[in-house]
Structures are given as C-alpha cells and as structure tokens.
Amino acid sequence: MTAKHYYSGFERAHDTYNAISAASDGKIYYVLSSDNHEIGGQMYVYDPGTDSIRFIGDLTTICGEQDLKAIPQGKSHVRFYERNGKLYFSTHVGFYQLIDGMDRLPETAPDGYALYPGGHFLSYDLETGEFEDLALVPDGEGMVSMTMDKDRGHLYGLTWPRGNFIHYDVDNDILRNLGPVSAGGEAGTPGEDFRSLCRSLFVDARNGAAHFSVAEGDIFTYSPETNVIRKLENVDLRLDYFGKYDPTRPGSMSYNWRKIFWHPVENVAYGVHGNSGYLFRFDPKDETIEIVERITSSPSKKSGMFDQFSYGYLGFQLGPDMETIYYLTGGPVYVDGKRLKGEEQIAKGAAKGLENLHLITYHIPGQTYIDHGPVFYGDGERPTYVNSIAVDGDGNIYTLARFEHDEKTIQDLVKVTNPFK
C-alpha cells in the first residue's frame, strides 16, 4: 500500500502517540509533539475535501502559559473526544530528563526555565474555534492516558509518571485525584516499585464505570457515583498467550492491555495486548475475557516473534461502520532471506529495530482477518514510529509517522486511501 505524507509546517515535530481523531465536521484533528524545552506541541486540522492543513495553536499558548517560562506543554498523548460540538483532550510533557538510562519527568529545569507545571484538560469548540482551559492536572504531572464518558460528561485518565487516577466532571467543574493506582508508576525504581502505566481506558456506556489495567494484569473499575476504585476479582490479563513478564521491569507494557475501546452495539470492550498482538473481547459485566484472534501482521505470525516496538501499537480503532477494527502494526523486515533482529531489551517505549508498517482489518461479524500488506511512501521509504490512527467517513486511514523532510527526520500527518476501494 502507498501512503502520502504531509508537511504541516512544524520542523521540530517529534513522535506523537494517540493524538489524532476524525470529528463530526469531516476533518482530521491532530497534535504534533515537541521534545524541546523552548517550544510546545502544535495542533492542526486537515480538511480531506480541500486536501489542506490549517494550524490551530500552540499547546502552551492554549493553556495560557506562554509567559510562564517553564518546560512547555510538549504533546497530547490522548485521542480527541467529541461532545456537544466540542473536542475534549489533555496535554502532556514532551521534554524529558535522562536519569539512569530512562526518560524521566525533569527534576532539574534548563537554565532560565521552571519545571513542568502539569498538564491541562482542554476543550475546543468546532464552530467558534475557541479553546477552554478546563483544569490543571495536580502535582506537576502530565496526562499519559484519557477517555471520556460523552453521555455523562466525565473525563478519566492516568497521570505520568506516578500514575494518579484523575476524574474530571465537565458539567460541574469538579476535579478529583484518586491517587496512585500502580505502585510507583513509571517514576518507580526498576526491580522494585516501577510499573508501566496503562495507556488506554474505556467507559462502560451502560453504567458510566471507567476501566483500566495495571502491569500485574489486574483490571480495575471506577464508579463516578461512589468515587471508589475496585479490582475485578473474577478476571485478569495474566494469560499464557500474552507471554510472561516481570511487572517491576521497564521495557514492555507487561500484562497491561495496549489499547481498548467500548463497542456500543455489543456492549463489550475490544482490546489488544501490545507485545503478543492478541485481540480479545472483554465483558465487564460478566467479568470474562475471550481471545478472538492474533492480529499481528501475517509475516509476524509466520515468524512467531514479537514485533519491534517494545510497548506494542496504539493505532487500534473501531471503524465508522461499527463492524471493522483497523490496526496499524509492525512486520519483520527480511534482508537476503534473513529477519533483521533488533535490540533484545530497551528500558522505554521505542522501536528495538527496523520494521515494516502493516494495515490490518478485522471484521467482527464475519470474523475476517485481512493483512493489507506493508505500507510505503511513494519514494519507497517506510513509515516508522506509528502509534496513532483515525478513520474518516470514507474509510481513509490517517496516522502520524516519521519521514525525512529537508534532511531532517520529523513526524507528521500520513494518509492511506481506503483499502477496500
């Protein structure tokens, strides 16, 4: 398959996770990340009708911190959620400090700068183009994951690096910090209280309960009526098919699901485990999990090996037909018949080696898996570091991926035409 890449105008654009979505106006909204302490992430919109891109704003300015002279709002790490004509999302830190070989929340700010002030919950009005700064994330942490109960107007998420569970009631402007839910989170010490944090939450639309996983494989639920988090006692993610992990060590998502979404027709959640690539069906009411299919690429299935991205892939979404799952995943690269091997272990979420990008679709009612093959740019180069997805009403797929621009590697918008046309 051939992909078209775009240059939005941000020459410092760094790797972005999750932050792209299709809105009801038919346009694609996305954030390009910054890993620099001098400039924040940048928000854009792509119009498929005119094949054009428009700059919307700098995240730091949107948060009203342009004069603060602090480590900026470097990225958004979450999808956009639409409710009553507004897009809801949150911000995250993009500038890290390397401590003991790991990317950490800076403890020492660059000269002339203050430490990161904390992420924000934001809304963007699709009609007026106005932003609203809803709430500041406590304790100077960013938002690494977020979901929304669009029916009831509640935002839920986990902070980085300590993993505090946050609940924000949009209509009543109430923010609750339920505290850490996974030992020391990614601020912890490897081998002791370190835990990889869940990157994806979902809401059971029937009762408004939010759900998330932890590195040990337990699944937790939060009720906005009681403000209580509890562990589900009859189900977990410690499945042999997912592999064996030490939750105290960095370099994988352990038993966490990588990405998950609520299916509004079936009233269950569909998720994917990052390292093994298994699609599963989770019923929170009955507290059951069923393995559906391994939705890694066909070459990955044949090789029997995990893919190269240490955390797995976030480009996983239910399509607009409410029947087809779209998944952007990895595939091994072969040279002279031999599979290229990457690093055995790394201490963060990153590619351990070169891989191809594959588009997978899975039709739920027909139980049909299709690997549409590797994706390349027109010049034959590979899209890499792909961890986001959006699908428009015409079935075209969008993501954010690396490519070369003016002799620099940046990450920007990429479009793949509907594979079924």
Image (tube, rainbow, N blue to C red):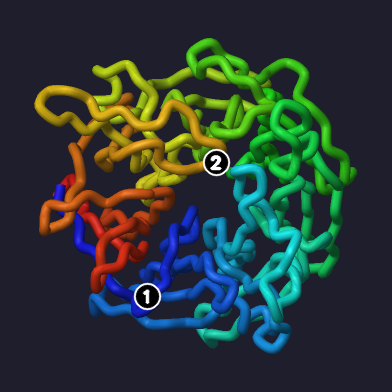
Name the residue type under label 2: Lys
Residue 243 appears in the picture as rendered? yes
Instruction: Tell which of 289 and 405 is nearer to you.
Output: 405
Residue found at x 63% / y 63% = 93
User: Can you give x and y, in whole percent of width and height, for residue 51 in the image?
Assistant: 24, 75
Instruction: Tell which of 351 and 26 is nearer to you.
Output: 351
Q: How crowded is mark 2: few (under 14 residues within 10 Å), some or many (20 or more)?
A: some
User: Can you give x and y, in whole percent of width and height, for residue 96 in the image?
Assistant: 61, 58
C-alpha separation, residue under disc 2 versus residue under disc 1: 25 Å
> Marks 1 and 2: in contact by CB < 8 Å?
no
Q: Would residue 66 appear left or right of 336 to someone viewing this image?
A: right
* N-term-proximal mark, 2 vs 1: 1
Residue 324 appears in the picture as rendered? no
Q: Name the quadrant containing residue 13.
A: bottom left
Q: Would residue 214 appear left or right of 341 to someone viewing this image?
A: right
Name the residue type under label 1: Glu
Residue found at x 60% / y 31% = 256
Q: Residues within 10 Å of mark 1 (few under 14, many from 20)?
A: some
Q: Give the number of the disc on residue 348.
A: 2
Q: Name the quadrant containing residue 69.
A: bottom right
Q: Is residue 405 above or below residue 275?
A: below
Q: Would residue 142 appear left or right of 88 to someone viewing this image?
A: right
Q: Name the element at disc 1.
A: loop
Q: In this view, does 267 lie above or below 144?
A: above
Residue found at x 63% / y 39% = 198
Residue found at x 31% / y 49% = 384
Q: Label 1, on which residue? A: 11
User: Can you give x and y, in whole percent of width and height, for residue 14 in the image?
Assistant: 44, 63
Q: Name the element at disc 2.
A: loop
User: Can you give x and y, in whole percent of width and height, for residue 189 in the image?
Assistant: 74, 36
Q: Name the quadrant containing residue 61.
A: bottom right
